[in-house]
Image (cartoon, rainbow, N blue to C red):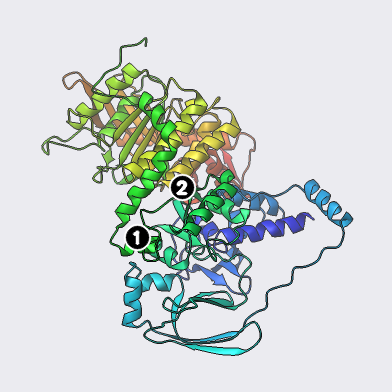
Amino acid sequence: MVMYFNRNMKEEILERTDRGLHVFNFYMPFEFKLKKNFRNPLYDDSKPSCNIYFDNRSNCYKMHDFGNIDFSGDCFWFAATVNHLDVKRNFPEVLQRINDDLCLNIEQPSLKHKQSKLSTLKQTQPFTIKEQEPTLPFKTIEKPFSEQELSFWKEYGISQKELNRYKVKSLTSYKSKNREGAPFQLETSRTEPIFAYFGNDYVKLYRPYSKMRFLYGGQMPEIYCFGLEQLPQRGDVVFITGGEKDVLCLSAHGFNAVCFNSETASIGNEMIEMLARRFRHVIFLYDMDETGKRESTRQCEIFSAYKTIRMELPLLGTKQEKDISDYFRMGNTADDFKKLISDSLEKIYTQTIMMLNSCEIDYNNPPDRSQTVVSVNDVPLGTYDNLFCITGGEGTGKSNYVSAIIAGTLPNADPAHIPDLLGLDVCPNTQNKVVLHYDTEQSEYQLHKNIGKTLRRAGIDYMPEFYRPVFLAALSRKERLQLIKDSMDLYHHRFNGIHLVVIDGIADLIRSANDETESVAIVDELYRLAGIYNTCILCVLHFVPNGIKLRGHIGSELQRKAAAILSIEKDENPALSVVKALKVRDGSPLDVPMMLFGWDKEKDMHVYRGEKSQEDKEKRKFVELTQIAKEVFRLQERLSYNELVTEIMQAVGVKDRTAKSYISYMRNNEIIAQDNNNFYFIKP
């Protein structure tokens, strides 16, 4: 029984990850191309003799190492190996790990529940099997698209590249039999072209100028969904339209879309649940005639649990202008359509807008005083689709450091003014996307004061429209997170993107930073939002780290998910603060320079004071690697090389190659040594 469930979950994972390709993409420490050789990341490979290919026999992607066949297998073997699991003994754990890491949300029913369900089935009466629709044999002869045919598609903004992507073909002829078994043949002509939407063992014909516009051949699937294969793994909006041409038209203009067999087709809960899991909004965009309006309303009512919504186009609903294809044919642009989407979503967020108005800082009307994307030396720190973390104790200058990052995104009215960004390189916000700054700790008065410092550092004396600081201290923890999620979506559409999100006080979004369940949930949610909105989310954690490890469960989760982590602490010189890298995407954080900043009385702000010396850098590396060694050997006196690599990777959240470089440093600097059996131990 358990094996049966494992097989079900295995197949479900393969279906949701492009037959395992997305699993390889997720766990591979670098980008790769199919059938192009690369060095195997699972060991110290000297020659690129490994590649990813599609295995037709097993119907999934696999990795093959020509240099060492033992390091070859499918995506489940690779995920198990990367996570130091045995794919045979720990297969259920491997499946669950993939499910969790890729946020697939596959529910695996308990054994008890299934046994109960099976026993219930045994007691029921025999059931009848629905008679399968007959397979209609067909034969097609394809031809290149004519100029006239391409002109037809071009009228809707659909190029030949888009047609090829969706497997749309032009036919010379089509032969089949009707349901009575009588053969028939269709021939293309200038006045009646034949287009074909091909699937697995079936075809749907589209004849735009014929009396019978649609015909079907082969065995149509139980649920026909055109465009599903072309959808990205996750995104902001997906549209459900009335037909294939609408899907092609939306895709050609940069929007995700699918359609079922018709606007009146029955749609399964599983399909909507899958779309709702992968996209922030599932929007029904049917025709503007009576049928389309009625069916889109009905579908939204059926799937209200998934918060589906419907959109109406500004069209008359006549035969000449009723669908999204007509909308674009009439000269409307992608930007026009984005405005329609934004207007539709603003109606949903009426209450959110009211709450935002009470929480946003109005810089021109100061409140009453009350009681109280980023790199350094070409090393990426904060990147789109990722989390970036800054941590440190009280009084170390974290808020000023965050202020410098925000200042780097603001417009520079005076080209001669070069803002002091405390040693960082910040990408300018040239497209005027929104910059969101949520503060969970400071009072309204203090936040307003810090905004003034940020503007002064940037060299401007006005509040840019795209900079939106939000005061959250007065809200409950649950309200804070909901406001962040809703306002990100609102401003993403209003400003056509989010350049940077700052959450100063991430621990204040949950009840306890040591609650593992809450910590995992909040970090996963923020990581998901960074991906959906293609932005960088900077999380400020007000904890003092333990060496190069963050404290608490929320610290552990950030250490695992954040692309980079910086720690700010007081230097040996108390007038200075020092910035240390605890984690970077590539390489060792111990190789990143330690930056200094301190208060400049004349400039009335913190300024960059250069880097710590190479000697200080080496001293830090020795001290912290010694501390890491003590931790990994705390429970075991002897470790093999592979065990030591694994322990270091788990202890400080670094990749395989970085852990190996740490071992080399420890050995060369006599922090650890090897015994006669080649096992490592820490030197006294």
Discs 2/1, front: 1
In the rendered image, which residue does mark 1 sit on? Answer: 327
Q: Residue at x 39, y 28 (%)?
A: 354
Residue 572 sits in which quadrant? top left
- Residue 231 lies, in percent from the top left, at 47, 60
Give 489 or 621, whichever is nearer the viewer: 489
User: Label 1's element?
Assistant: helix
- Residue 459 lies, in percent from the top left, at 17, 31
Q: Residue at x 32, y 70 (%)?
A: 155
Give 331 or 165, whichever is nearer the viewer: 331
- Residue 367 lies, in percent from the top left, at 30, 16
For the N terminus, which image quadrant? bottom right
Residue 304's place in the image compared with 368, above or below, is below
Residue 617's place in the image compared with 1, above or below, is above
Residue 147's place in the image compared with 392, above or below, is below
Tag 1: amino acid? Tyr
The crowding category of the residue bearing disc 2, from other C-alpha atoms within 10 Å (few below 14, some 14 to 19, many at least 20), is some
Answer whether labels 2 and 1 touch (C-beta < 8 Å).
no
From mark 2 to mark 1, how far is it between C-alphas?
A: 54 Å
In the rendered image, which residue does mark 2 sit on? Answer: 658
For the C terminus, which image quadrant? top right
- Residue 48 lies, in percent from the top left, at 45, 67
Tag 2: amino acid? Thr
The crowding category of the residue bearing disc 1, from other C-alpha atoms within 10 Å (few below 14, some 14 to 19, many at least 20), is many
